[in-house]
Amino acid sequence: MQTNLRSKVTNAKPSIMSDKIDHPQLCQWLNAVATSRDKQAFTHLFQFFGPKIQRIARNRFPNEAQASEVVQETMSNVWRKAHLFNKDKGAATTWVYTVMRNVTFDMLRKIKGNKEDNLSDDIWPVAESMVSENESFDDHLESKQLLHVIEKLPEAQQQVVKGFYFMEMSQEQLAVHLNLPLGTIKSRLRLALAKLKMQLGEGHD
Amino acid sequence: MNKHNLKLPVFPLPVFILPGGITRLRVFEPRYLTLVKVASKEHGFLIILTNNDAEPVQSKWGSWVEIINFDKGEDGVLEIDVKCRALVKIKSINIDNDKLQYANALEIEHWSQKPVANAADELSESLQHVYENNALLYDLYTEKPFQNTSWVIARWIELLPISLSDKIKFFRQHNFEDVKNIVQSIITKHQK
């Protein structure tokens, strides 16, 4: 009885993927949300993904409310970021589960405070197993995740962390450094960029 | 000039770095810890520029960097110092078994790799001042060739407060004099 139950639990995970998934349909819905803010399409997406996300999230969080929060947050990100989905780069399911994964990381970080460095992919066997091989959203969404985290740090710390990632000065720092008014810096930068653009010619980016 | 075909793991980051540039990165995503392992055994890795919203800015160019130092930050996170060796043109990107992206790339020549002696004193002094007031920059660069104008200009471009999507234009601008004039038009204190 016991073993039976246990194997049932482990089998429950892959079964999410074994459902027949109409990928082109999902892509079409996402596309409709992205291009025409189609509420009907979004409803379909919600009906498809909502229960799945709820079920996965329920394994990660101690109560139903938090799992629901993951659903809400994920789906509102899907609504807002649908335009970032590119069907040439991976399946719609992969993309949505990546969004979900990031939402979950965010929440786990909130809960666990400074322990985020303990989080590793191995606590995410479910989401990982859904990530297809040619997955590229994953990367930038993950770095995006990092930026969210940075934004939540106190100002002083933010400076240090940003210093690592973004070597550049702010316009204010440059103005102070050169002992020039901020307006002068801004107009010089604008002129310089216009010049650069002219040198390179248009339409090559 | 030897131009080899390179196969390098890719780290997408909002970091604009030109040859000779050094920066410190914090690495905690397991996948990128793998990248560090691969990169330190082989020939470094490629930074492909994303914007501050972590969306890719372009995928034609990359900065080929080597790990020159590593340490554990106060919070236990791995910190690596990387130095840009050259710019590359990307031919294709594939995903490998370890889920890392690998780029097939070709090294390109860039003005920032050719030393030019003392051609812009004011920019050198100004940059020196920045380094003296920024402990991290000061420590990262064990060598600070302020007399090499192309090095100075490359470092200034990295520091300039302009968007990353504008910065990539400096990958494409190969005329050193033009680049120098542009940076001077921003940094020079009193313009003629």
Image (spheres, rainbow, N blue to C red):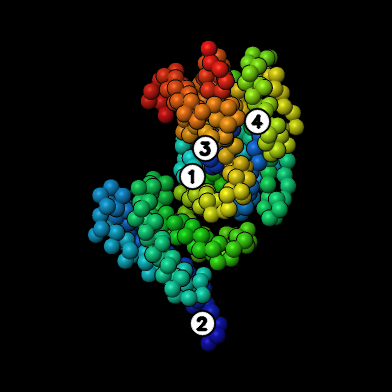
Numbered mark located on residue B66 in the image: none
Callout 2 touching callout 3 (CB < 8 Å): no
Residue receiving disc 3? B49
- Mark 3 and mark 1 lie on one chain; the one further toward the N terminus is 3
In x, y percent, where is residue B21?
A: 64, 31
Can residue B48 be seen here? The reply is no
Residue highlighted by disc 2: A5
Q: In the picture provided, is A34 more to the left or to the right than B119? A: left
Q: Chain of mark 4?
A: B
With respect to residue B85, does A157 lie above or below? below
Residue that label 4 marks: B130
- Amino acid residing under circle 2: Leu
Question: In the image, what residue occupies the spot 62% across and 28% down?
Answer: B155
SS label for mark 3: strand
Q: Can you identify the residue that label 1 sits on? A: B54
Tag nearer the camera, 2 or 1 = 1
Name the residue: 50% across, 49% down: A144
CA–CA distance in space, label 4 to label 3: 24 Å
Asked if badges 2 and 1 are on one and the same chain, I answer: no
Q: Nearer the viewer, mark 2 or mark 3?
A: 3
Give the quarter of the image for residue A121.
bottom right
Can residue A190 be seen from the camera position used here?
yes
Q: Position of residue B40 (x, y in %)?
A: 70, 42
Specify the quadrant that holds the C terminus of chain A: top left
**Type of amino acid under label 4:** Val
- Pinpoint residue B170: horizontal percent, then vertical percent: 52, 25
Element under disc 1: loop
